[in-house]
Image (cartoon, grey):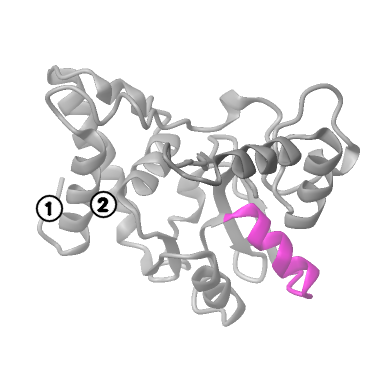
Amino acid sequence: FRYISSQGMAYNTDYVEEEPTEWDDIKTEDLEDFLTFHDYGPSRFGIAAASIDAEINDLSSDDDDAEALFDELSAEVHDQHQYVRNYWGSGDQFMQMYRSEAVGAGSAWGGRIRRMNLNGHDQMEFTHTDQGGIAWSEVYCIPRDSEKKDDAYELLNWLYDRENIIELTEINGYPLPLSGDEPDFVSELPDYAEHPEDLVWIDWVNLPEGDIDWLTRMSERFAEIKGGQWEP
């Protein structure tokens, strides 16, 4: 029932001794062919935006500046790709890669790294770095003509009850947003961010609008980079 989390950096302290403060810190000779990232274009461009301190939502304009920014972000995605061994499509996949030490660092969901720690993999750490990670939200959709619409609303009302949402946060390890004071354990979760501006927020509404669907272009460019069909 989580509806917001973040994608940051995971790293194995057996291979990365000091906590990275920038995404460039894992682009090293020792970690070449030893990284993993999410196999999804907008995720890759979001991390690239964090890495070069760019505002990804400036792509919503259709002018030459947006095209220049897109190429700049593409170049960073391409640069990170040179260090990748495998991409992951699910949390289970990157957990297995980190457990088997097929990779030593890359992107991840903080809640999954917490689960690895609880299962004895203390060598794994998670950070947003000083540059940030990606805010990731999930949306509930209720079919307009559903005969169980009232049940769905009842479930959501139950979920948003403060007592229930705190219990769910403790169970799943993702810091669901709360109004008012937060329990201490929430701020200790790996995904926790002090302020929303500490993360990259992708504008899922406006980026696909206008003359250019930037989200589709991200996925297409990412596929070209993986296939060796695009270079800076």
Helix, strand or loop status at disc 1: loop
Question: What kind of residue is marked 2?
Answer: His
Q: Earlier in the sequence, mark 1 or mark 2?
A: 2
Magenta region:
109-122
Across and down, in percent, residue 87 comes to 38, 66
The spot of residue 150 in percent (x, y) is: 61, 38
| Foreground of the two, 67 or 185 | 185
Which residue lies under the disc numbered 1? 230
Q: Nearer the viewer, residue 83 or 211?
A: 211
Secondary structure of the residue carrying tag 2 is: helix
Q: What distance separates the C-alpha of mark 1 from that of mark 2? A: 8 Å
Residue 97 in the figure: left or right of residue 14: left
Q: Is residue 9 above or below residue 197?
A: below
According to the picture, the residue beneath numbered tag 2 turns out to be: 78
Question: Magenta: predominant secondary structure element?
Answer: helix
Residue positioned 25% across, 31% down in the render: 208
Residue 128 shows in the view:
no
State which quadrant residue 58 falls in: top left
Q: Is residue 154 visible?
A: yes
Total label count?
2
**Residue 114 sits inside the magenta stretch:** yes
Q: CB of mark 1 within 8 Å of CB of mark 2?
A: yes
**Residue sitting at the far bottom:** 100
Q: What's the residue type where badge 1 is placed?
A: Trp
Residue 42 colored magenta?
no
Residue 140: x and y in percent read: 52, 41
How many neighbours does mark 2 have within 10 angstroms: few (below 14), some (14-19), or many (20 or more)? many
**Is residue 66 found left or right of 147 in the rendered image?**
left
| Residue located at (57% from left, 44% from top) | 6
Q: Quadrant of residue 229?
A: bottom left
The quarter in which the C terminus is drawn is top left
